Image: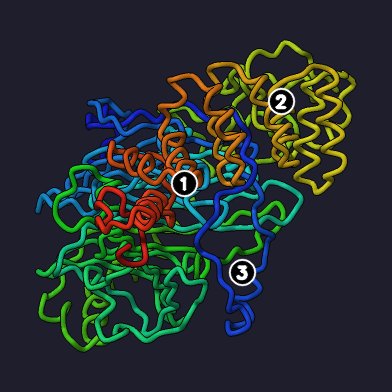
Amino acid sequence: MTTLYAQDLQLPAASLGEENPLPPVSSSQDLHHVENLAELPAEMRENMTYPDHLQTMLPGLIQDGYDRELVERALPSLILENDHLRATILPSLGGRLYSLVHKASGDELLYRNPVFQPANLALRNAWFAGGVEWNLGSTGHWTGTCSPMHAARVEGPDGTPVLRLWELERTRNLITQLDFWLPDDSEQLYVGARIQNPSSETAPAYWWSNIAVEQSPGTRVLVPADQAWRFGYGNRLDLVGVPEYDGFDLSYPVRHRRAVDFFFELPSQEQPWIASLDAEGNGLAQASTDRLRGRKLFVWGESTGGRRWQEWLSPGLEGHGYAEIQAGLARTQMEHLKLPPATNWHWLEAYGRVSVDPAKAHDGDWKTARLATGAVLEPVLRSLAAREEEWLTVIDAEPVEPLATGSGWGALELRRTGWKVSAGTPFAEETMTDRERAWLPVLDGRMPLDHHGAPDGTLLHWKDLLEAVEDDNWLIWYHRGVARWYADDHDGALDAWRRSDNCLKTVWSARELALRSGDSRDWDDAVALAPAGLHQLFVEAFEWAVEAGDTRSAEQFYRRASEQVRAQPRIRAARVKLLLLQGDAAGAQALLDEGIELPTVREGENPLAEYWLWAQRELGTFRPVPSRHQFGMFGDS
């Protein structure tokens, strides 16, 4: 019998903290940049150059308020369970499939992170490792990965409960829907996914199901492919043979020294699947209907930096950590597809335990290994199309019992656009909070100044409405400036922020003007207007001055900051660089020796190791970089 119920998940967890009120200037720098486009197939090139790079995460704000203090907390979870499997889903954290347990064997089929520890890997910064993450929108970990989704029970096609989650992805205005379905007798968890484009414009479509699996020396990843596009974070995609690469078998994750992606080339006649098997031939297999054709293997690598990242994401890590097997709409994660107006795309995924003769699973002949695994999966593969047809009979079914509430942004957008969306993914007016309702007057040509605190992230899709507002106050001119800037009307944006400043001097317009001018006097003005609690502005101004080499301004900003602000990890790290720029290597080294833990260190960055080596060179000493500072993804620092 299949049951669906709510249950708190108790585990050591860091606080996610508040969103950063400063609007993101640009999108996070994604590491997947390809420069050898001319060498790639025409279709792949076209997909990689469409659309233009996402300039900003607006209207979303950055989630960088988390810490690294693990405290026992209760996270809301929803459990879908039958006699064979128990699936745990986290509706408040992007619908993450946190755990999938095979009950007869007791095996956890996913990498289940024993803690919740955000780190700076997602498009809006905060991300956490483990389970299955659903990535919609743009290259990278999606904007909703650490945000709540709507959740409800739906009557399944076989009478069993279906757990439905849905939400609006705000940068692309696409609706994502996830239906978790576990029939009574099934040894497969089915996940029906749908992307709705309700608008009258073509939208960029990007999707990758990101599956974390535990790795050990005996773990092997099998997939029905003989070639893969290798991306080693060196700005190139190269087609390589599978499994032999660079003198070793790439299908064993722990044999890789460096962080690397392999995007597998699945022949068109092959049903798409991927599996991760342990030394005994047991593990997880993921399969899907044809629309989800891409498959990928990602490893952190076994270098000092790779191991450090695994420990950073899973404090107290034991064993060999995890690898990621992924499934996507395109062949690589650098590609976006064109989703036509008023169009929906859907597919069905299956997740379950697979057991293959270990001698065959680990056969030195790749064809033998993958064919043996495919043969075991054949019943699942053969039934997927029929299962999808069953699921489609309820894809638009209205929810019968609400289980969790997401954001009110979808309801707000429906008020603006009148879009027709599926009855199965309703955005009810009552889901709007004060945050969303604050924008309703704009629909009537007003933006009253009953605003307290920081302005919310500008609704870039509302640019024409913002221009039509009749009110003349600092807030409307501020939002017009932001919307104009990202519509490439830079002169108009600067004019709007100056008009905002004329209406009332606020830190918000002053900060935008400082960012664009790069003038220390403008930064002085912004810092002077910043309330004491806005530590993010002090951090930003100090980092700007240090990076610009303006040591005089940096010292002034530092002196104006409170002791609490000076204790911020980003301030302390930038202070190290400032001391080095000033020729005080001993002072910089002393700060490093005190210990700096930078919660928001970015994937692909390694600043404290760089500062350590710089200080050592200046001092003429040769102390090795401590492992706590080693975040180099591409080999030892």
Mark 3 or mark 2, whichever is nearer to me: 2
Which percent across, then down, holds residue 187? 23, 55
Between 177 and 252, the one lying in front of the other is 252
Q: Is residue 76 above or below residue 242?
A: above
Could you tell me how far apart the alpha carbons at marks 3 and 2 are, in whole angstroms? 41 Å
Res 48 label: 3
Between 126 and 111, the one lying in front of the other is 126
Q: Of helix, strand and loop, which one carries label 3? A: helix
Residue 256 in sight here = yes
Q: In the visual, does 552 lie left or right of 4?
A: right
Q: Residue at x 40, y 34 (%)?
A: 569
- The amino acid type found where label 1 is placed reads Gly
- The amino acid type found where label 2 is placed reads Asp
Q: Quadrant of residue 515?
A: top right
From the image, tell me which residue sits under label 2: 525
Q: How many marks?
A: 3
Residue 402 in sight here = no
Q: Residue at x 43, y 45 (%)?
A: 120
From the image, tell me which residue sits under label 1: 583
Mark 3 or mark 1, whichever is nearer to me: 1
Could you tell me how far apart the alpha carbons at marks 3 and 1 are, in whole angstroms? 44 Å
Q: Of helix, strand and loop, which one carries label 1? A: loop
